[in-house]
Image (cartoon, grey):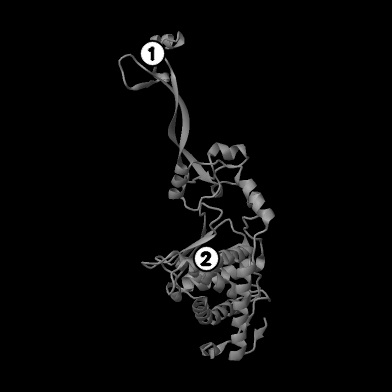
Amino acid sequence: MAKYQKRSAEEIKNELEGYHQKIMTLSESFKTDPTEMADYFAFSSKFYQYSPKNQQLIYDQNQYASFVGSFLSYKEKGYHVEKGQKSMKVFVPVPCSYFYRNGENTSTRLADATPDERAKIARGEIEVKKAMAFKLGSVFDISQTDCPVEDYPKIIKFGENSHTHAEIYEQLKGYCEKQGFSVTETSLRSIELRGQYTPSTKSIELNNKLKDTQMLGTFLHEMSHGLLDHSHKDGEKSIDTYLKEFEADGLTIMFMSHFGFEITEGTKGHLASNYKTFNTEISRLEEGESDQYSLDNAFKNVNNIYKEHIEPMEDYLTEILNSRSDHLLIDESVNTRDYEDEWEMEM
């Protein structure tokens, strides 16, 4: 496995500036394919549309739910809800018929009518009225079914299988766990939620439907949140969230570029969305209020974390390589670099 020669501070500076330019170019230029958007909307139309009240109910139970349907609706489409999945409750309209008994102000269901009352109803002596009642029903997100990833719309990208991506993911997961984070692949009850980082428990959860390329990209993004110490603080605004996401995307791109991987479509889209929303939020701030928000500071934060961890990462990967007699764990495209103490140079 080739090893880079020690580089000068100028070479390091050029590398980081190259990463920054790449991040900004992706932020400003990435656009979703319109044909894929049409595919997405066509896919959405196959699932039930819910009232505002039911939409709120679904959101309260699973804010990342996307395509929702009942057990029977999935069955009709050829899919099945996976065993053990927890449903979300919604209000289901049920037509009902009722009548009023003589001298009573409370309605009685037609099903509860006596034989004598049914005879009078048949003769038209008792008026029957119709109304809509509601009962609780169960629905599931499509991620809770056995619908294969291949049947999802193209805009819902889960990546591709790749032995190289899978290997480096497993190796860097070990490094991440050495830093005190836990990493698990699990069902996140959503096909739009790729992963999540919980600061209070330092835990990273990844959507188990992801394929190798997206699994690596999502893992690096959530690990970046952890390494950047992104935790919620009192008084934070929405713009703080978008800035943190931009930082995590930026650090992800730097790690992926360093290890020789193409940036996934999911990372590109996520970066572009957060960058554009961040700029929109900046434009809404009062004069002087925007001074505390700066992409230059974001890049400084990202640089510091990148420089802090890239050499230990390389050392960890080298240790794994040296412990394997077959030397197959790390691909030739993954280069171990000898940075030594040059990272201490101030940019």
Secondary structure of the residue carrying numbered label 1: loop
Q: To which residue does mark 1 refer?
A: 114
Q: Which residue is denoted by mark 2 in the rendering?
A: 280
Q: Quadrant of the N terminus?
A: bottom right
User: Is tag 2's residue or tag 1's residue first in the polypeptide sequence?
Assistant: 1
Q: Residue at x 56, y 66 (%)?
A: 276
Q: Position of residue 328 (x, y in %)?
A: 66, 73
Name above or below for residue 52 compared with residue 155: above
Q: Amino acid at mark 1?
A: Thr
Left or right? Give the position of 243 relative to 233: right
Q: Quick one: 319 or 47, which is closer to the camera?
A: 47
Q: Residue at x 65, y 62 (%)?
A: 31
Distance of mark 2 from mark 1, alpha carbons? 66 Å
Closer to viewer: mark 2 or mark 1: 2
- Residue 153 x %, y %: 64, 51
What x and y, as percent, mark residue 74?
58, 40
Element marked by disc 2? helix
